[in-house]
Amino acid sequence: MIANNAASPRQIAVFGGTFDPVHWGHLRPVLDLADQCHWERIHLLPTCAPPHRQQPEVLNTHRLGMLDAAATLDSRLYVNDWELRQGMPSRTLPTLKHFRERCPDATLVFIIGMDSLLLLPEWLHWERLFDYAHFVVMPRPGYSLDDARPELKELLAQRQISLTELSQGHGGIYIAESTPVDISATELRSRLSELTECPEFLPEPVWKYIQKHHLYGVG
Ligand code: ATP
């Protein structure tokens, strides 16, 4: 696959999530995309959950600690605590506005998984998000565009773009061709306490952090 934006510093990749914990299902597809698109930096942005929703199992400091551990794997990974510092539930629109204000000339790319894309029409001000960024969607086992609701199918008909079109502008949706990784944080959390060795779905530095701090009932 060809990207026309080799080594462009003008693309900013932003990847938000609960990261409770961060795992290879998050990182592998994103690093594949970074290779393909020549991203120099991927902002890993842990989100702040609204009070009425399920809270992360571990403290924010530990979610950040695990992300810091993951970031030692690749110099392009950059842990950004901006949403946590806002002290209020995270919304994508203010986040994208923040990046736009800080980097007015950059092309913003916001990364989500296929499960998140299928729920996009439920996000607050979802149609306005495209005024600020392109969306990149990572395939995820068990989630298919076939299940998209009609308004999402219509949106894709208007906005789906190719990899090469990601390098400029905003408002497109690129469905990545990365290899799907069959792991979820929910499943990991339920299994971690039974493990004595680093599971294949978790980067070793993240596993070491979990062990050191006895997170998720480990050790
Ligand atoms: P859970 O498994 O409990 O639903 P999660 O890992 O999906 O948790 P987040 O950490 O919030 O939850 O995910 C951050 C982003 O990564 C979301 O956009 C989600 O769709 C995406 N994502 C998570 N796991 C995968 C995966 N295995 N493949 C592709 N995308 C994923």
Image (cartoon, rainbow, N blue to C red):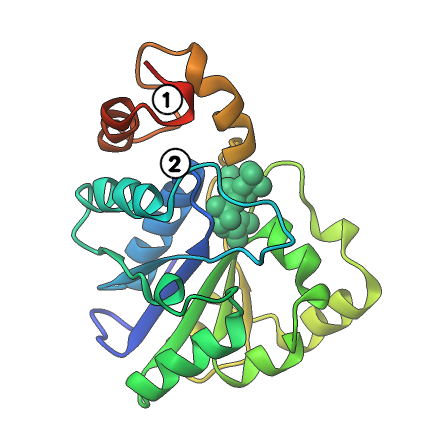
Q: Which secondary structure lies at badge 1?
A: loop
Quadrant of the rendered image containing residue 65: top left
Determine whether, in the image, residue 161 is placed left or right of residue 118.
left
Please name the residue shown 42% across and 70% down the image: 109
Is the residue 71 above or below the residue 40 in the image?
A: above
Q: Do the residues labelled 1 and 2 touch (CB within 8 Å)?
A: yes
Is the residue marked 2 within 8 Å of ligand 1, measured from its CB?
A: yes
The amino acid type of the residue labelled 2 equals Trp
Residue 7 in picture, x, y percent from top left? 20, 69
Q: Residue at x 39, y 76 (%)?
A: 108
Residue designated by label 2: 24
Tag 1 residue:
200
- 40 left or right, relative to 18: left
The residue located at (38%, 65%) in the rendering is 14
- Quick one: 42 or 52, which is closer to the camera? 52
Q: Which amino acid type is shown beneath numbered disc 1?
A: Glu
Foreground residue, 20 or 34?
20
- From mark 1 to mark 2, how far is it between C-alphas? 8 Å
* Badge 1 density bin: few <14, some 14–19, many ≥20, Cα 10 Å: few
Residue farthest right in this picture: 150
Looking at the picture, how far across and down is residue 144, in whole percent? Answer: 69, 47
x and y percentages locating residue 127 in the rendered image: 66, 79
Identify the image quadrant of the N terminus: bottom left
